[in-house]
Image (tube, rainbow, N blue to C red):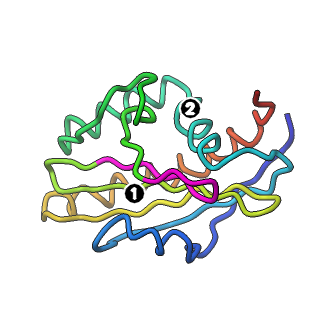
Amino acid sequence: MSETKPVEISMPAAVGELHLLDRVDYEDAFSVDTPVKQSPEQWIRAFAEDAPRWFQLPWAGIGKILLGAQFGPLFTAPGYVVGWKILYHRPDAFAIGVDSSGGLSARLVALTPPGQAVIATQIRLDTTYARTLWPVIRQGHRFFAPYLLGRAAANGEWP
């Protein structure tokens, strides 16, 4: 396992070009330098599916209870990654998303420029309720997004 340090980067233009949301109220992107050569799909799966269970289940529960997140199957199922719907699947990018009845829509995008893995997030906040909750959720997101990317990179011995 190697030492990996994700860093925040400017939002890659390729993410905006996907037009996954009609409006973006928040976005960020984290990158990690890595010799691991995997597809964007494999990076999203390592980021989300290989996250510790102590993270996955409470985080999904918070999304469902507080925001009415409309998750699909939380375990392996065609068209989904840990309950997030696959929205874009190409060799150069892979995106998943979840929407909620509480007014928050989230998109995660993986890109794999040479020698790097990038995980980008875009959020749309449609209600006062979602805009009120977002500052608290954002704190957790900004801690866990780079943590999970670094963990995926450090565990990069994939099949």
* The N terminus - image quarter: top right
* Residue drawn at 81 percent across, 45 percent down: 36
x and y percent of residue 18 in the render? 45, 68
Given residues 134 and 44, the one toward you in this image is 44
User: Helix, strand or loop at disc 2?
Assistant: loop
The amino acid type found where label 1 is placed reads Arg
Which sits earlier in the primary sequence, circle 2 or circle 1?
Answer: 2
What residue would you read off at disc 1?
Answer: 138
Residue at coordinates 24% horizontally, 64% vertically from top-left?
125
Say whether residue 111 is magenta: no
Q: Main secondary structure of the magenta part?
A: strand
Disc 2 designates what residue? 51
Q: Which residues are magenta?
A: 88-98
Q: Where does residue 22 sit, x and y in percent of width and height? A: 28, 72
Q: Nearer the viewer, residue 47 or 65?
A: 47
Residue 91 belongs to magenta span: yes
| Residue drawn at point x = 59 percent, y = 29 percent | 50
State the CA–CA distance, disc 2 to disc 1.
18 Å
- How many numbered marks have been drawn onto this rendered protein structure? 2
Q: Is residue 75 left or right of residue 158?
A: left
